[in-house]
Amino acid sequence: MILSYALYFAFACFGLAVLMNLWKIITSEGVGDRVLALDTMVVNSIAILVLAGIQEGTEVFFEATMIIAMLGFVSTVAYARFMLRGNIIE
Amino acid sequence: MGEIGDILTAIFLVVGGCFGLVGSFGLIKLRDPMSRLHAPTKATTLGVGGVLIASLIHSFVLEGYVSVHELLITLFLFLTAPVTALFLAKAHIHRHSEEEVLPSPGKDTCWAVLDERTSRQIIDEAEYGQDE
């Protein structure tokens, strides 16, 4: 009982966080801010997937979570590299 | 046992959710780009850590075994969050800062990010390589 209420609260928190990140991506001026907001969105979506795993009681979501975590890290590093150098692989 | 596990999981879920919300709110609220870097890298990572601990306790109480997946994800996130923050800070220095505004680099001769000579040399070599 208390667990399902806490799950709904956490879902609401992280859903609101993803909406805030989207708002930041749309309204910010700089490229760096947008990349930072995208990275935060990836981390928040990882949290939402883990919450879905708790709710459903399955282990399937963890593989998806690992893949999204790795993709998010590599894409953020590639964006930062592009901002630094102008190309990614020299 | 089950009751205590449920309450512990609920506590960690609520704490993690609050931290995640604060991290993303700080991304909107803070003024300066470099202080904006603080909110997602610290608070959001802590929020996800709270949710992962809740999942760990839940799987231990419900199914009776310790799941390694959560530990792997926690380790990966806690390793990569500082690296992304460092890369974004470097990119910000590269794009927005002048040499005079920054503090002294100490023993080194210059800030590596702002070293015109080395970056120019690398870009030239890359372009020269493409022409060949």
Image (cartoon, coloured by chain):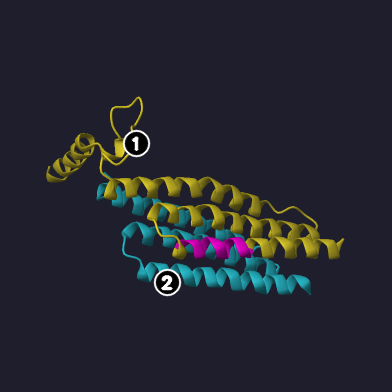
Place residue B57 in its image quadrant.
bottom right
Q: Chain B is which colour?
A: yellow
Identified at 60% across, 73% down, the residue is A12
Looking at the rendered structure, which numbered label has been put on residue B15?
A: none
Element marked by disc 2: helix
Please tell me whether residue B114 is drawn above or below residue B50 in the rendered image.
above
Q: Quadrant of the N terminus of chain B?
A: bottom right
Front-most of residues B87 and B92: B92
Tag 1 residue: B103
In the rendered structure, the answer to whether residue A11 lies left or right of residue B61 reads left
In the rendered structure, the answer to whether residue B125 lies left or right of residue A52 reads left
Between the C-alphas of marks 1 and 2, the distance is: 34 Å
Is disc 1 surrounded by few (<14), some (14 to 19) or many (20+) residues within 10 Å?
Answer: few
Q: Specify the farthest residue to the left.
A: B131
Q: Chain of mark 2?
A: A
Give the magenta part as a residue range.
B17-27
Identified at 24% across, 50% down, the residue is A86
Element marked by disc 1: loop
Q: Amino acid at mark 2?
A: Trp
Q: Amino acid at mark 1?
A: Pro
Tag 2 residue: A23
Q: Quadrant of the C terminus of chain B?
A: top left
Point out residue B113 in the picture as x, y percentages from the top left corner: 30, 40
Point out residue B35 in the picture as x, y percentages from the top left corner: 44, 53
- Label 1 or label 2, whichever lies nearer to me, is 1
Q: Which chain is cyan?
A: A
Front-most of residues B62 and B110: B110
